[in-house]
Amino acid sequence: MPFSRQEYDAVVIGSGPNGLSAGITIAEAGRAVLLIEGQETIGGGVRSAELTLPGFLHDVCSSVYPMAVWSPFFRRLPLAQYGLEWVHPVAPLAHPLDDGSTVILERSLEQTAQNLGADAGRYVRLMGPLLSAWPRLESSVQSPFSIPAHPLAAMRFGFSVLRSASSVAKHAFRGERARALVAGLAAHAVLPLERVPSAAFGLVLGIIAHTQGWPFARGGSQNIAHALAKHLASLGGEIVTGMPVASLEQLPRARAFLCDITPRQLLTIAGSRVPAGFRGKLESYQYGPGVCKLDWALDGPIPWKARECGRAGTVHLGGTFAEIAYSERDAWCGRHSERPFVLLAQPTLFDSTRAPAGKHTAWAYCHVPNGSTLDMTDAIEKQIERFAPGFRRRILKRSVRVAASLEGYNPNLIGGDIGGGVADLRQFLLRPTRQFYRTPAKGIYLCSSSTPPGPGVHGLCGHLAARAALKDLF
């Protein structure tokens, strides 16, 4: 048996950011923790590898980390001591348009507004009050089912953001530049833009862009997992890799099992320990569209028509609000868009450690129907060529992962769903109830992105689940 002892206070299944954060929280309380990872390397969605050519380091799943620098849990950990360094692009985001211009989401509210022409004042009127109130609101967003420290501010914020992106674009703005910016931000929700709460995702990401930025991890996202794991080890936590968990019965005894997995895997792993009523709830849990993801080794930077795109770490490719809304509706309805909305990251413009001198990497994905086996390379690269003519001539090699293959790499990515489940209004409110960290089976907790506050690399799902376990059992 690869364990140092026969019984632990807590066993954590999964070494993604939430699993590692759960382990750290338990270990900080002086409890014995074992963390088990099915893959040979830790990290879940924060891994890096040479996917194309030697010397070109790519982020296998996530690459840009607004939620990580926003996370109060990560901010209080000494991760810099373990080599984690954040690299901030000059601007968080660019959104090029067909007229050759681009909308830049700057760290400065006022500079961003200047990009928006006649909508400059409207953008300030929308985002200014949210930014001013943000210090009073962060704790409510980070722990959405706790009692707000500032109830009136939280209520006003809820009324402002619990809307559809279409509603915000229509009523807050008059011009296409601002509406396109809203569409790209809201598309991170992986919902039709006509659905509530697509605006909430976009507005929160915009707020974080202004307040904390959208950085990369220097040297690759794997360094996030390594820093968390080193801190867990410093607290006495034990990590075992290369051990897929098929059943809780194969694990050592523990008072708490914290599962960084989605409801579907919990049904399998927990087996008969899950009562029939709760099993039905888990079985009805809905997963959303998947992604087709590409990585490129390039012989130079992407040749953007709008040179300002080179100032941004992340680029949204999709043109107008209407086009992006159509693309997101396609994926939701089981169709593959001919002109998909593409989220692209260009880390080597700001982190030269990831590629040989003078060379570059790029990372991108588009949304597709859940479980899709279609290779979207041509459609994605056409969207890039639309705003960066000559891009394909710079490709040295590409790596492609279709949605169906992502689940084989990481079992949490059901059908290629990178968000841990649909975040429509029903599951946004009910998927993550306070009870959902807990299960009817004593000592079994769910701590993945299928719990509050949901998707993103922030560790809060694991941290909050571990706090629940500590309160219940120790």
Image: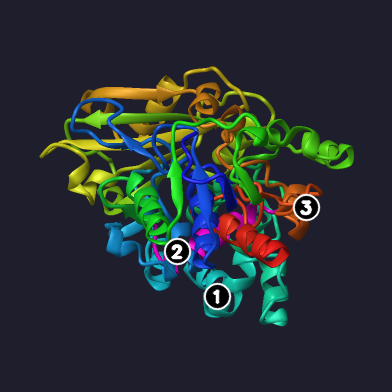
Q: Provide the secondary structure element on which disc 3 rests.
A: helix
- Pointer 1 local density, CA inside 10 Å: few below 14, some 14–19, many at least 20: many
49 vs 77, nearest the viewer: 77
Question: Gap between marks 3 and 2, in whole Å?
Answer: 26 Å
443 vs 160, nearest the viewer: 443
Q: What residue appears at the point 49 percent right and 38 percent down from the top-left corner?
A: 37
The image quadrant of residue 130 is bottom right
Q: Provide the secondary structure element on which disc 1 rests.
A: helix
Q: Which residues are magenta?
A: 197-214
Q: Which residue is mark 3?
A: 430
| Amino acid tagged 3 | Leu
Question: Gap between marks 1 and 2, in whole Å?
Answer: 18 Å
Point out the tag, 1 or 3, that comes first from the N-terminus: 1
Q: Position of residue 112 (x, y in %)?
A: 40, 65
The verdict on residue 200 being magenta is yes
Q: Which residue is mark 1?
A: 134
